[in-house]
Image: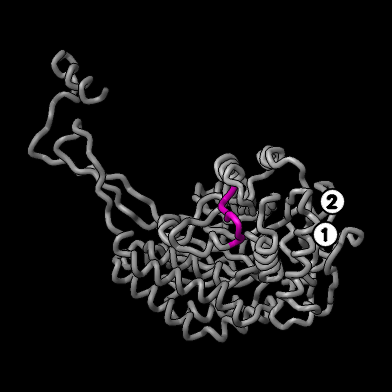
């Protein structure tokens, strides 16, 4: 799509929003139902596209993308009337007689820019939130997952008129043209580097942005942890989608006294979950592109690989890999891994680990395996991170009852469920003042000592 075509599209969407067509709860529910029905109808095509782009099995595609999305849409439909209702709040006595309330209002015309790692879910779930909130939207899928992008376009084009919801495919030229336009909100999921550019471009228009980024999410394992269970859950979370998950454990920080036992359990779990030859496991995915495959291979220090390390350049597959004896000076610790490489670092003092984490970039997720209540209190109260789990990984984002998002370098804003509705909503604060009484104390001239005493009484 050309720059002029994108400009024309945004004008159509702004005009459609101004018509008020998207505002009624009945309309929004009907659009969510259309979307739900289309996801069910095209489940096989969605899963086939995910397999083509990322090697995902149909089970994983449904579990982590289309099925997850259906849950979110159902939640929004169930609670939409309550979410969209004005919220009455207490009115101070000084403003008598009046009532005060917060009116949820759509931002208007929004842009949703999605990543390649969960290309269906992260394109359409934010869209469902935007629809529920009453916005028009342009969705821009990632160019790295073209098959899924085409399915997203097919579904959304079938469901909606482009003046309401539209899809723009393409690469950097289309991204730049979209960011040249004035939107009422931009929702971006992707890398920190691109997120900085998106935020810079948004600032030129004073456009608010929700940024879902990433970072090096640590997984801390102390000596009181249930090691077999910790290993099982870490292996699941780390190597899901071939490690290409923004909330995957990036690395393990393990108490030195149990490190060898944990590594042994992790090796056992990798073989149990993925078999002795993971590269030939049809349910194990692949790296999205040659560029990312080469980057990941360069991060592996072969002398520190204690499990896995096998690669298949033709299929872009990298076996689940464990590196031991890693320090913060290793290349693998210099950037977010975003692949199936798990570095193991050790510590001797848990309190020192907590203090060190305070000095590092705030991660999107943090995980702690322990049975020590003091350790749990320290981590959950003192450290700043987007979200996380105690004695598990990843599952904190699998609920519509809690918002999901980052903090600091890992993002700003959150979504899922009510938080998703709120992300695409502005709450107007409104006072409705009655006309049958007009207290004169606020008006000049300020000469009455009686009025001054009343003001001091109301405002103290």
As drawn, the label of residue 330 is 2
Q: In the figure, 64 relative to 227: above or below? A: below
Q: In the figure, 458 relative to 269: above or below? A: above
Residue 441 in the image, given as x and y percentages of width and height: 16, 23
Residue 64 in the image, given as x and y percentages of width and height: 57, 72
As drawn, the label of residue 184 is none
Could you tell me if residue 195 is visible in this image?
no
**Res 395 → quadrant:** bottom right
Residues rendered magenta in the picture = 385-394
Spatial CA span between label 2 and label 1: 11 Å
Mark 1, secondary structure of its residue: strand
- Residue at screen point 79% across, 72% down: 319
Could you tell me if residue 21 is visible in this image?
yes
277 to the left or right of 208? right
State whether the magenta stretch is mostly helix, strand or loop. loop
* Residue denoted by label 1: 323
Q: How many numbered discs, if any?
A: 2
Residue 305 in the image, given as x and y percentages of width and height: 86, 62
- Residue at screen point 76% across, 74% down: 271
Q: In the figure, 35 relative to 264: above or below? A: below
Mark 2, secondary structure of its residue: loop
Looking at the image, is mark 2 or mark 1 nearer the viewer? 1
């Amino acid at each position: 799509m050309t720059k002029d075509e994108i400009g024309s599209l945004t004008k159509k969407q702004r005009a459609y929003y101004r018509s008020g067509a998207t505002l009624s709860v009945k309309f929004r529910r009907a659009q969510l139902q259309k979307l739900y029905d289309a996801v069910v109808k095209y489940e096989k095509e969605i899963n086939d596209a995910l397999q083509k782009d990322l090697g995902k099995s149909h089970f994983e595609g449904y579990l982590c993308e289309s099925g997850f999305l259906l849950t979110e849409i159902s939640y929004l439909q169930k609670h939409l009337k309550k979410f969209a209702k004005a919220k009455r709040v207490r009115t101070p006595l000084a403003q008598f007689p009046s009532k005060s309330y917060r009116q949820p209002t759509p931002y208007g015309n929004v842009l949703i820019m999605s990543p390649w790692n969960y290309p269906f879910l992260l394109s359409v779930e934010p869209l469902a939130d935007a629809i529920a909130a009453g916005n028009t939207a342009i969705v821009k899928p990632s160019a790295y997952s073209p098959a899924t992008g085409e399915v997203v376009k097919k579904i959304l084009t079938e469901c909606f008129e482009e003046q309401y919801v539209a899809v723009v495919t393409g690469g950097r030229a289309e991204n730049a043209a979209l960011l040249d336009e004035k939107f009422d909100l931009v929702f971006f999921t992707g890398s920190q580097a691109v997120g900085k550019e998106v935020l810079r471009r948004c600032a030129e228009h004073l456009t608010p942005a929700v940024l879902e980024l990433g970072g090096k999410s640590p997984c801390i394992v102390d000596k009181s942890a249930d090691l077999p269970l910790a290993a099982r859950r870490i292996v699941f979370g780390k190597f899901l989608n071939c490690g290409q998950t923004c909330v995957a454990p990036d690395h393990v920080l393990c108490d030195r006294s149990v490190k060898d036992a944990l590594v042994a359990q992790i090796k056992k779990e990798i073989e149990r979950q993925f078999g002795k030859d993971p590269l030939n496991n049809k349910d194990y995915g692949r790296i999205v592109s040659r560029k990312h495959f080469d980057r990941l291979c360069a991060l592996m220090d072969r002398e520190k690989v204690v499990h896995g390390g096998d690669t298949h350049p033709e299929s872009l597959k990298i076996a689940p890999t464990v590196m031991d004896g890693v320090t913060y000076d290793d290349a693998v610790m210099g950037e977010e891994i975003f692949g199936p490489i798990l570095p193991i670092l050790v510590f001797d003092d848990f309190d020192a680990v907590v203090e060190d984490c305070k000095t590092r970039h705030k991660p999107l997720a943090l995980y702690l395996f322990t049975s020590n209540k003091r350790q749990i209190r320290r981590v959950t109260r003192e450290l700043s991170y987007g979200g996380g789990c105690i004695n598990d990984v990843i599952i904190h984002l699998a609920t519509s009852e809690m918002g999901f998002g980052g903090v600091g370098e890992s993002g700003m804003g959150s979504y899922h469920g009510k938080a998703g509705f709120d992300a695409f909503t502005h709450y107007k604060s409104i006072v409705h003042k009655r006309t049958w009484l007009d207290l004169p104390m606020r008006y000049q001239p300020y000469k009455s000592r009686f009025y001054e005493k009343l003001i001091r009484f109301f405002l103290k």
